[in-house]
Amino acid sequence: MFIETQSENDTKKPKINLNAINNALKMSKKNMPIWFNLGLAYKYAKMYDKSIEIFKYLLQIDPKNVNTLNALGEVYFENYDYDKAIEVFKKIFEIDPNNKSGWANLGDVYVKKGEFYKASKVYEHAMIIKSELFNEWNNYGSSYKRKDNIDELPNHVNQELNIKLQN
């Protein structure tokens, strides 16, 4: 209903039916998950201004909702507004210092900005939160590799990366 599927041979992304979502909103103005999904739909449609507007509205209702903050930060990130994305992701840690998604997204922003040292520290913290996650180890190593400083990785990281890659 909200996402229209396309034929199997069509390689384009699914088309989001924004009219159906807007109609659902009119029927239930206080249903926050519908508002949240509309914000995501606008994000996927690359209508960033609308998405930001909705997420900010939701944060007026529930300013400590880390999912909404994370989604807002992702919109800023996708819209190349890295400084605002960093600001939003840091707000998450005031509420939930161990929010893995927030830490991972913050690391991605620093990598995009070319701030590899900050990215490595953020990814390192994300790994401490949940060390068995391969993506964070991979991103940590990639941030050094992009700088051509793979030899500078601490020995325990090299060993852990080798273990993860062999499994």
Image (cartoon, rainbow, N blue to C red):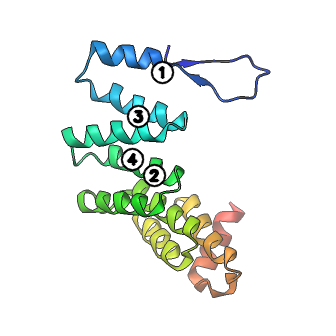
- CB-based contact (under 8 Å), mark 2 and mark 4: yes
For the residues labelled 2 and 4, the Cα–Cα distance comes to 6 Å
Which residue is tagged 1? 18
Tag of residue 72: 4
Q: Which residue is mark 2?
A: 76
Mark toward the start of the polypeptide (3 vs 1): 1
- Circle 2 — which element? helix
Residue 130 visible at all: no
Q: Is residue 37 left or right of residue 116?
A: left
What x and y, as percent, mark residue 10?
76, 23
Residue at which label 3 appears: 39
Earlier residue among tags 1 and 2: 1
Relative image position of residue 76 (x, y in whole percent):
45, 52
Gap between marks 3 and 1, in whole Å? 10 Å
Please, what is the three-letter code of the amino acid marked with disc 4? Leu
Hey, what amino acid is under mark 1?
A: Leu
Q: Is residue 45 above or below residue 141?
A: above
Q: Are marks 1 and 2 in contact (CB under 8 Å)?
A: no
The residue positioned 30% from the left and 43% from the top of the image is 56
